[in-house]
Image (cartoon, rainbow, N blue to C red):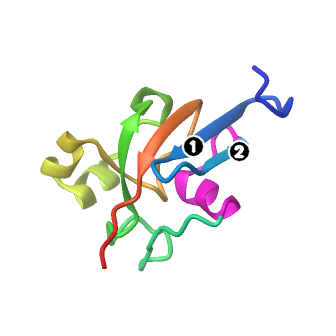
Amino acid sequence: MLGKKGKKNAAEVHFSTGVVAEVESGTTIMAASKTVDVEIDSYCDQSCSCSTCKVLILDGAKKLSKMNSDEREVLGAKLVKQGYRLSCQAQINGKVKVEVPEYF
């Protein structure tokens, strides 16, 4: 599979603000956000323990890595059911659209 820029195994994150990050497949949403200066809060240094880096998956949830038990526990059943993922854990394997919650 070739992405727009001819990269093999390209993946895309479309942020609800209109910003698009094109990265290699397997990159986390958080890492992708840093390539395009989209700020996602994170207080645990990406150790899957604080949930502040959660994002709402608007489209393409099946293009993300499977949720592991730690991520599921940190988010809780309600947020998982609503479609949230931890951006530090969710790896992109295609095209996804996400919304970054604003806390303040």
Return the residue found at the far right: 6
Quarter the C terminus occupies: bottom left
The residue segment tinted magenta is: 24-36
Alpha-carbon span between mark 2 and mark 1: 8 Å
Q: Position of residue 24 (x, y in %)?
A: 72, 41
Q: Which residue is mark 1?
A: 13
The picture quadrant where one finds residue 31 is bottom right
Residue at (57, 43) in percent of width and height: 13
Q: Is residue 67 visible?
A: no
Quarter of the image holding residue 41?
bottom left
For residue 101, say whether it is visible.
yes
Q: Does 58 sit above or below residue 90?
A: above
58, 50: nearer the viewer: 58
Identity of the amino acid at label 2? Answer: Val
The residue closer to the viewer here, 87 or 98, is: 98
Residue placed at 35% from the left, 70% from the top? 52
Q: Is residue 48 left or right of residue 45?
A: left
The kind of residue on which mark 1 rests is Val
Q: Residue at x 36, y 38 (%)?
A: 58
Q: Position of residue 101 (x, y in %)?
A: 34, 62
Q: Quadrant of the N terminus?
A: top right
Q: Element under label 1?
A: strand
Asked if labels 1 and 2 touch by Cβ distance under 8 angstroms, the answer is yes
- The image quadrant of residue 32 is bottom right
